[in-house]
Amino acid sequence: MYNFVEIGIDDTNFKIMAEKACRGDVLQGFKHLTPKDVEKIFRMCL
């Protein structure tokens, strides 16, 4: 398994990526995730 750094992804666009993933609201699922939550998950993948 690879992390983001190993495949050339940095944190430059994490905020935008998180907002798009949540469509500007809350990502529904087992646990509701805000864009800030998703951004934190992206950072853990570095």
Image (tube, grey):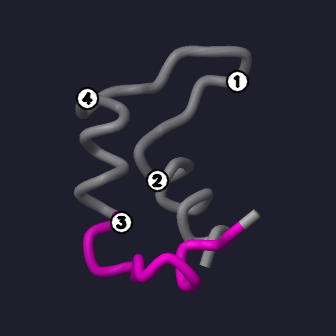
Mark 3 near mark 1, Cβ–Cβ under 8 Å? no
Residue positioned 47% across, 38% down in the render: 34
Q: Give the range drawn in magenta.
A: 2-14
Q: Distance between the residues labelled 4 and 1?
A: 16 Å
Q: Distance between the residues labelled 2 and 1?
A: 14 Å
Q: Distance between the residues labelled 2 and 3?
A: 10 Å
The disc at residue 31 is 1
Q: What residue type is labelled 4?
A: Arg
- Nearest-to-viewer mark from 2 and 4: 4
In the figure, residue 45 lies in which quadrant?
A: bottom right
Residue positioned 26% across, 70% down in the render: 13
Residue highlighted by disc 4: 23
Q: What residue type is labelled 1?
A: Lys
Secondary structure type for disc 3: helix
Q: Which amino acid does label 2 sit on?
A: Lys
Residue positioned 56% across, 49% down in the render: 37
Mark 2 near mark 3, Cβ–Cβ under 8 Å? no
The disc at residue 36 is 2
Q: Rate crowding at label 3 as few (under 14), some (14 to 19) or many (20 or more) other CA atoms within 10 Å.
A: some
Q: Which of 19 and 10 is in front in this view?
A: 10
Query: Which x, y percent locates residue 26?
Result: 42, 26
Mark 4 near mark 1, Cβ–Cβ under 8 Å? no
Residue highlighted by disc 3: 14
Q: How far apart are marks 3 and 1 (CA)?
A: 20 Å
Q: Rate crowding at label 2 as few (under 14), some (14 to 19) or many (20 or more) other CA atoms within 10 Å.
A: some
The disc at residue 40 is none
Q: Is residue 25 above or below residue 5?
A: above
Residue positioned 30% across, 53% down in the render: 17
Query: Which x, y percent locates residue 27?
Result: 47, 25
